[in-house]
Amino acid sequence: MAKAKTKVQYSNDDIKVLKGPDQVRKRPAVIFGSDGIEGCQHSVFEIISNSIDEAREGYGKEIVLTVYNDGSIEVEDHGRGIPVEYNKNEDKYNWELLFCTLYAGGKYDNDSGGNYEFSLGLNGLGLCATQYASEYMDAEIKRDHKKYTLHFEKGENVGGLQSVDYSGRDTGSKIRWKPDLEVFTDINMQPEFFTEMIRRQAIVNPGVKFIFRKQAGRSFETQEFFYENGISDHVTEIVGDTAFTSVQSWSGERMCRDRDDKDEYKCKINVAVAFSNKVAVTEYYHNSSWLEHGGSPDKAVRNAFVYQIDNYLKAQNKYNKNESRIKFDDVADCLVIVISSFSSVTSYANQTKLAITNKGIQDAMTDFLRHQLEVYFIENPLEAEKIGNQVLINKRSRESAEKTRQHIKKNLTANMDITSKIAKFTDCRSKDVDERELFIVEGDSAKGACVQARDPDFQAVMPIRGKILNCLKVDYDRIFKSEIITDLIKILGCGVQIDGGKAKSKKKDINAFNIDNLRWNKVIICTDADVDGFHIRTMLLTMIYRLTPDLIKEGKVYIAESPLYEINTKDKVYFAYTEAEKEKYIEEIGKNKFTIQRSKGLGENEPDMMSLTTMNPATRRLIKVMPDDVERTAYIFDVLLGDNLQGRKDYIVEYGANYTDNLDVS
C-alpha cells in the first residue's frame, strides 16, 4: 500500500533571502554559468580581467598568472592597485565593497568619462563572487605608499585590512586564491586552459606581456605570451604560408546607438583578415573577452562579407546564368578573420560573456566592414579576383556535395524493407543488432552453401555478382551507379561518409553516415582462398575504407578465414589454414593413412563443412579488420589501389621480390 505523502506547510516565514557568501556559494552557476569545471575556469577569468583592464588603460605592461601545487592560483599586475581605503560616498571601506559586496565596482560610468573607457568588467561581480567561491583568498595591494593585505576564508574576512608603509615606487595588485570544492564540483584545471586563456588575451592586448608560471616541485615552469602587433600577428601566425592574399589590418571608431531613444556610445573596431585554401578561422573578441558564441560581430561579418563579395561577383559577371548567389559558408571556407572590438557600453548575453547582443555594435561593424572590403577590392584587384574565384569554387563544391548527399539519401534509404528490395539477399530472423551478422560472399554458388550452413536466426548472406569497382580510382557519381555497391550500402543501413573537403566540417549534414543505423554487429567478408578471392576481398575492403571507414575504426569488419587444405583420415578430418598447420597435422597423423587436397571453393563445400569452418561462431576463424595506423592504411591503399602510379612502381621495385612465389604466370 502506497505511503501517504506528508503535507508540508508553506508559510510566510519560508521565504528567505541569501546573504553574504551564500549568494554565490549556494548558487555559483548563476554568476559563473556552471558549478562545474567551466564555472571554476570562469572565476579565474574574472580576476585576470581586472588586471587586463588596468593594462589597457596604460597602467602596467606585464601580468603574471601562477598555479601552485596546492591548486591555488595567483594573478599579479603592475596597475594602480585596488582602492581599499574608506569611501565617503558609500560610507564603507572599499575593500568591503569590492571583495564582499556584489554589484560594487568602479566601471559603471565608462560611457561618461569614468576611469575605464573600455573594460572587461562591467557588473561589479567578478572579484567578490570569486572571493565568495574560494576556500581562501589573499590580497596584497601596493598603492598610495602603502602595502595592504587582506585574508578571507570561505567568503568571510579574517583579520580586517592590514597596512604598512611602503617606500617602493611600484604599484599593483596580487590576488591568490584557491577555488572551493564545496562550491564547484571540479576544481582540477589543466595547464592547457590557463595557457590558452592568456594566449588569447595576449593576442587582443598588443604590447602587454603575459607570463604563465606552473609550480613543479620547488621550481616553476614558465611560458611567455606577447604579440607586439596583436591580432595582425595572430592572423599571420594562423595562415603561415597558406594564404593566397596579404594580411589586411583595419581599424576605426564609430558612434553607436542600440535604440533611437538610447544614448550614443563609442565603439572601437580592429580587424585582421586574410584568405587561405588550407585554414579557415573566425575569432571574435570584445573588450578582450573571447566571444566563443559570437553574437553581434558574427552577424556583422556574415552580412558584410556576403554582401560585398556577392556585389563583386555580379559586377564582374562571375556568376553563370541562373546561378544562385553565394552563402556565408562559401566565404567562411577560405576566410581567416580576427576581430577585436571595444565599447563603452556592452550588453553580454550573460555573465560568462561568450556573446554580445548590442544592435548598435552590429550595425556599426557591418557598415565598417562593407566599406573596408569595398576599398580593399578597388585597391587590390588581383586579390579581389582570387577571393571571388575561390568563393565561387567553394559554392559550387558545396552544391555538388549537396546534390550527392540528396542522391545518396534517395537511393540509400536506411529504413526500407531491404529483404524484398534487394535481389538475392537472404536476411536473418533476428532484429537484435547486437547479434546480427552479415556474410558478404563470392557469387551465387557460395551463397547457396552459406545459406544452408548458416544459423538463420542471426546470420544473413549477400552474394557479390561480378567484379566490384576499385573505389579509390573512381568518383562518387560512378561509385553510386554501381548496383553492387549501392545494394551493399543499403544492406549495411548506415549510409556513407562523403569526403567533401572543408564543407565536411562546416555542414555536418553533408555526411549521410550514422553508425547508429548500422544493422549488423559483424560485417564478415567471406571469399575463396585463391587469387580471385583475395582480389574481391581487397576490393570490398577498399569500398568500406572509402565509403564507411568508421566501420573499420569501430571494429565491425571481419574476414572469414577459409582453410587451405582438407586432410582426411579414417577417423577424423583436419582443416589446415596455413602451410605450417598442414605440416603439423601430417606429423600428428604419423604413419596412419590419409588423403590431402586443396580446399574447394566455398560454393563446392558441403553445408556441414561450411558450418564447421566458416559459419559456426564456436569453430570458425575470423580476422578483425582494425588498422592500428589509419595514415599507414590510407598510404598503402593509395599506393596499391589508387592513382599513385609512381608510388606503386617504387613499391614494386622495393618489395616485389617478397611476392615472387605467389606470382601466377601460368
Image (tube, grey):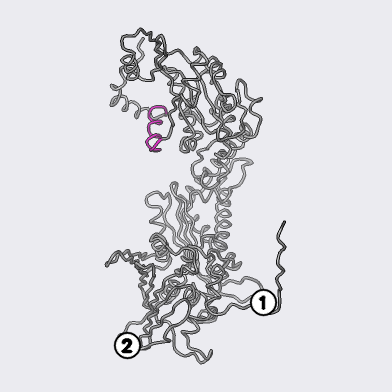
- Secondary structure under tag 1 reads helix
Which SS does the magenta portion mostly show? helix
Q: Quadrant of residue 219?
A: bottom left
Alpha-carbon span between mark 2 and mark 1: 51 Å
- Secondary structure under tag 2 reads loop
Report the front residue among 214 and 543.
Answer: 214
Hey, what amino acid is under mark 1? Asp
Instruction: Tell me: 506 left or right of 653.
Output: right
Bounds of the magenta segment? 627-641
Give the labeled residue for mark 2.
Answer: 166
> What number is the disc on residue 137?
none
> What residue sits 56% from the left and 70% below the top?
27
Q: Count neighbours of disc 1 (C-alpha within 10 A) and say few if under 14, some if 14 to 19, many if 20 or more.
A: few
Of the 4 image quadrants, the one containing the C terminus is: top left
> Where residue 228 appears, x then y in whole percent?
36, 66
Q: Count neighbours of disc 2 (C-alpha within 10 A) and say few if under 14, some if 14 to 19, many if 20 or more.
A: some
Q: Quadrant of residue 234?
A: bottom left
Q: Is residue 666 one of those drawn in magenta?
A: no
> Where residue 626 appears, x then y in whole percent?
42, 35
Q: Quadrant of residue 651?
A: top left
> Where residue 221 appears, x then y in whole percent?
30, 64
Q: Earlier in the sequence, mark 2 or mark 1?
A: 1
The answer to whether residue 389 is above or below residue 579 is below
The answer to whether residue 243 is above or below residue 366 is above
The answer to whether residue 137 is above or below residue 212 is below
Report the front residue among 135 and 441.
Answer: 135
Q: Is residue 639 one of those drawn in magenta?
A: yes
> What number is the disc on residue 14?
1
Report the front residue among 573 and 284.
Answer: 573
Q: Is residue 10 visible?
A: yes
> What residue sits 62% from the left and 70% below the top?
258
